[in-house]
Amino acid sequence: MPSKQFVTFDVANQFFGVPVAAVQEVLLNDVYTAIPLAPPAYGGLFNLRGEVIGTVDLRVRFGLPARAASGPIVNVVVLAGGEPVSLLVDKIGLVVDVDDEAFDAPPDTLTGPVRSMVTGTYRTDDRLLVILDVEACVTVTRSGA
């Protein structure tokens, strides 16, 4: 049975995943430099071994309030357009294997800004895994989300 692998994480108690092939690494960071006049979804910049990495706060992208900026924040560093970008998430999960047969289109009940970032869903044993389009997640408009 063909299957796919996804790195999973939680944002606002919802279960999301991105393809393993798109993930460079997962790390904790608590030092960010604000980007003046940037849309609110940009969480700032940080230095990763001499490379400046931009961050996108998925809470803001999904139309939720931004997270508190205190303490370490989980970064899922993905490659988008060949460049590393960090997705700020609430909690990291595991790498999961899912069968292609378990794939479903995004549910009609999924509304709001997140709808345009979802490619589909997989039913796991205990939760619905919502798969995100990495490129759509990191494309932030001037209006902020």
Image (cartoon, rainbow, N blue to C red):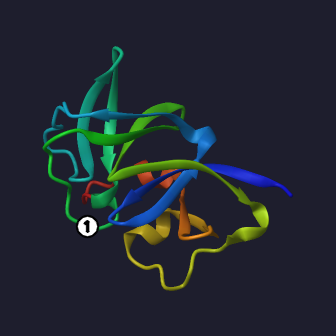
Which quadrant holds residue 2? bottom right
Which residue corresponds to the image point at 55% horizontal and 51% vertical from the top-left? 18
Q: Callout 1 environment at 10 Å: few (<14), some (14 to 19), or many (20+)?
A: some
Marker count (numbered) = 1
**In-image side of 98 versus 54 (left or right):** right
Question: Measured from the top left, where is residue 116 in percent x and y?
Answer: 48, 67
Q: Residue furthest top?
A: 50
Which residue corresponds to the image point at 54% horizontal and 32% vertical from the top-left? 82
**In-image side of 143 versus 16 (left or right):** left
Which quadrant of the figure contains the N terminus?
A: bottom right
Question: Measured from the top left, where is residue 121 in percent x and y?
Answer: 60, 69
Q: Is residue 110 above or below residue 27?
A: below
* Viewer-nearest residue: 67 or 91: 91
Which quadrant holds residue 54? top left
Q: Residue furthest right?
A: 1
* Viewer-nearest residue: 134 or 5: 5
Which residue corresponds to the image point at 47% horizontal and 50% vertical from the top-left? 93
Is any part of residue 25 visible from this angle? Answer: yes
Question: Measured from the top left, where is residue 64 in percent x and y?
Answer: 26, 67
Secondary element under disc 1, as helix, strand or loop, is loop
**In-image side of 140 versus 81 (left or right):** left
Is any part of residue 145 visible from this angle? Answer: no
Q: Look at label 1 and name its amino acid.
A: Leu
Q: Is residue 39 above or below residue 77?
A: below
Q: Is residue 28 above or below residue 107?
A: above
Which residue corresponds to the image point at 57% horizontal and 40% vertical from the top-left? 22
Q: Residue furthest front?
A: 125
Which quadrant of the figure contains the C terminus?
A: bottom left
The residue identified by callout 1 is 64
